[in-house]
Structures are given as structure tokens and as C-alpha cells.
Amino acid sequence: MSGHEDFRRAKELEEARKAGLAPAALDEDGKEINPHIPQYMSSAPWYLNSQHPSLKHQKDWRDTKQDSMDMHYHRGRKVFQATKFRKGACENCGAMTHKAKDCMERPRKKGAKLSGSNIAADELVEDITLKGFEAKRDRWNGYDTSEYSRVIDLHEKVEAQKQAVRQKKELERRFKLNDGAEPSGEDALADSKAERDPDKHSEDEAGGSDQDEEDEDRLGEAEIAGFGQVEKRVRTTGGGASGSVRNLRIREDTAKYLLNLDPNSAYYDPKSRSMRQDPNPDKDPKEKTFAGDNFVRKTGDYDHFQALNLHAVQAANRGQTVAMMANPSQAEAIYRDFKAKKAKLTTQKKVDVSEKYGNAASADKPEDELLLGQTEVYREYDASGRLLKGEESHTRSRYEEDVLINNHTAVWGSFWRDGQWGYACCHQLEKNTYCLGAAGLEAASEQTAQLVANMEAAAKQARAKAAASSKLDQTVQASKALWGSETPDDIELDQDKLKAALKKAEDFNKADAETDLRKRKYNAAVGDDADVTPEEMEAYRMKRQQTDDPLANLGTSGSKGYDLV
């Protein structure tokens, strides 16, 4: 039973670790073990006797050999220069550090053993033990970087010779022109360039070497055109004759995978060299040089095809028999008719709006003086703006003004009341109502009077309600003062009546103590007075025994007050 429980707990712990609810297991070095590693990889073989979770059996447990960076050969260093041939030396060059079969010098016609001259110096032989695989096979070990200066000197000499050859050709070309001979080939092309742009030609002559270097690196038009060419692959491992390959991009272009270095951006497929998504979706489209390979899918007739499909679906939803997949020609014809009708309606709508409101962009528009309401009529005004001389004129707007409808004698907006516009002739507040004339004015005045009366009645009712509530509050306060729940501080009591009330309360208490109330009949009248005065209520408060007072029975408890400590 315990084995099943342990197995179940182990499974639950494994699931919790995979879900991130439990911490990952730690190996012997204190490093976390990925819980998603399969069991056949994380389980160690039985012969390793591993008691703790570990991944050492998946790694190279042998110690790696590290070589020091200072361990290198002193290539080409000489230690001794002999003057005559020595026994046991190389028969070809005369050095003691190697034999004739290992000599790296060119075989001499007459070796040092026979000639006894030009004896080569002995090289430095070092016994360096390298442990690493790469260090043993490092062909640049001991290389002196200063030796590369000879390569640079050789390159400079070659460039100097090329410059001399170019100058010689240029001089010969000029001498031929001076002699009157006709130039041919490259000479004629150079002369035409010089005639078109003599300044640039002189600059090219001054910097001829730089220009030639650029010409060597520059690609021709035929080579550039071949970058976008798609060629068939024949008898290749990439798919045979049926496969296709696109040539490499132009070297000056930025690679697609370098447009956005975020690893979570658009995916780049190295096999097909395609990036379907946009690597920079948040960038301004005007600044983009690449918007993803899927961008070309939405160019050309793509928009037209999508609009055609959408029109077919909408037409089918409205009950028209249109099937894009079954009869595309019919759908295309219906869509063409729809676009023609839509264009006709749009044009007619523009014409109607232009006829109704005018067209400010047309050639026959009114003059600016008429549009702005400017005239040559003379008028004079005083400092307050009142007209002194001339006639007052109001600039009319482009909309209809002073139009009377529904028997009204005033326009809409000539009357204002309580935040609403209306007609001044009948005080109607609805725009399209029929004018009532004097009857409307009378009805409006009666409505206003009724409204005022209703407001006064409501105010009177509110005042009566407030007075009743204040009277009720006074009654409640008097009742509280009378029956002992609350006693106001400003109450005045008669001292003689208070003494009489106290004496009467004492007599009542004595009689009550001597009388057995259990033998009293139902509804027996104990008190004769029905009304209670404030003095009697005060006497009752003073004589009332409070049983919940802890100090009431202080002298009769028998503990002399120690029970309160």
C-alpha cells in the first residue's frame, strides 16, 4: 500500500513541477533540473549508484584539458650559425636540427656536405606538449604578425606598377590625338566621356587608382538582374529537376532577419529565405522597406477578388441567387452591374447637393463681395453702435429665412421660455404645430396660471407638513421630559410641590411594602390621580431604586467593601 502511495505522490509532485506549482528538483551541484526532461534521459543507469537526481550521466564527466595561451612555438628562431659542415648535419642545408629528408629548403644542386658553404643556421627546437585537440592542430601557432608587412609591401608595389601602366596608356592616347589619328575602342569611349563632363574626367584621372578599385568591386547590370532569377535545379540533392531555387539577394540589401533582432518577432525560414509576417508592424509604413512576404499576396487583383466574394455573400443573404464557386461569371456580371448603379447614384447625389447648396469649386461661383455681404452703401454709426445715417441692412444667410408655415405669423425661434424656443404669435413650443392665434395665447396664459397655482398649493402643503412635524417633535420632547426618559435642563420645578411629592412617594412605598399585591384584584385602582405633574415625576426619579447599581448595597453585603477590589 505504501508503494502505491509513494508512486502517486511522486506523480503528483512531477505534475506540480511541470505546472510550475512546485520548485524544481536540484542536482548535486545545487542547480535546477528541468522538469520537462523525459524520464529516460533524467534516470541514471543502475551501475552508477546515483542516490540523488542528477544529469551528470548525460555530460562528459572527464576533465577537459586546457592549454595555456602562452604555450606556442617560436617559429623561425635561430640559435647557432656554423661556418663549416658538421658530421650528422643536414646534407642539403647543413643545419644540425633536422635530416635531409625533413629539410624544408629547396634541394641544392650541390649540397652543403659537398660544397661546405652557405651553411644554414640551426633552428630552435622546442618540446611543447599540447593537450587540446584544437591546439595540436593550430597551424597559426607561433606565427609572427609582423611578417604580414611583407604582404602589404608586395601589394603596394603591384598597385604602383598598375598606376604606371595606366599613365603610360593615357600618354599614348593623347599623343595619338595630337598626331591626328582616329581613336578606336576604349580611346573613343574615354574621349566622349571627357567631352560630356571635362571636370569629372579630370577628377577621374587624378584618382585613377581609387576608381579602378571601385570598378573591380562594382557589379554589372547583367549580374544584378540575375539576383531575382528563378532557375531549375537538375540532378541535385535539393529536389531534382522539379525543384527550384532563387538566387541570393543583392549584398547591399539588408537581410530580412536583421530588420528586427527581437527573437519574438516575425519568424524567418532559412530554408526558403522567407519571412511571411511583418517584422516591424508598429513602424510607419512610409519608412518601411520590407513589410513581409505576405504583403505581395494582397496586391494586384486581391482587393477586387475580396470585394467580389463579399458582394456575393451579401447578395445571397438578401435572397438573391448568387454562387461564387458554382457560377463565378454570373457573380462577376452582377457585381459589375452593382458598381455601375452605385456610381450612377453617387453622381446623382453629388448633382443634387450641388444644385441645392451650390458648388464653391465651380467656375460660375458668386463674387467674394456678395458672399461676404460687402456693399458700397454709405452708413454712419455713433460710438455706441447706433445707426446715424443710411439704412440698416442685415446680411442674409444661405438658408431660407422669414418662411411662415402652418398659418403662423412669426417664424420659429421668435419666442423663448424656460429654455425652449417657440412661436411668438401663439407661444407654441412645438415646431411643426398649427398656429392657434389668440386662443393659443389664452391657453398658454391659463397654463402658466395653473402652473403657478399648482406650485403655490404644493408650497402651502409643504409648509403645513413642516409645521405638523415640528409640533409632533415638541409633543415628543414634552412626553420624554414628563415620563422620565429625558429631562431637559431648562425645566423649573416648584420646591414646595416637590417636597409634597417626595412625602407622598414615601408614604406610597410604605403602604406598598405592607400590602400584598398578589391579593389585589384585576384592574384595581391603586392611584387616585390620573395626571402626573413634573414634580411627582422628579420625586419618582429620586426615590427609584436602581438594582443594577454596584454601589447600591455596599453597606449590607458584609464584605465591608472588599468585594469591589
Image: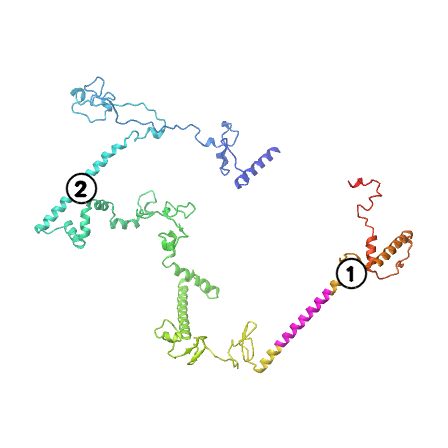
Among the 4 quarters of the image, the one containing residue 469: bottom right
Q: Position of residue 138 (x, y in %)?
A: 32, 30
Magenta stretch: give its range.
Answer: 448-470
Q: Is residue 247 magenta?
A: no
Q: Which mark is residue 193?
A: none
Q: Residue at x 32, y 27 (%)?
A: 72
Q: In 3D space, how far apart are the residues under numbered discs 1 and 2 (Cα atoms)?
A: 129 Å
Give the camera-side residue of 35 and 239. 35
**SS class, disc 1:** helix
- Nearest to the eye among marks 1 and 2: give it: 1
**SS class, disc 2:** helix
Amino acid type for the residue under numbered disc 1: Ser
Give the camera-side residue of 128 and 383. 383
Q: Which residue is mark 1?
A: 479
Q: Is residue 232 left or right of residue 383?
A: left
Q: Which residue is mark 2?
A: 162
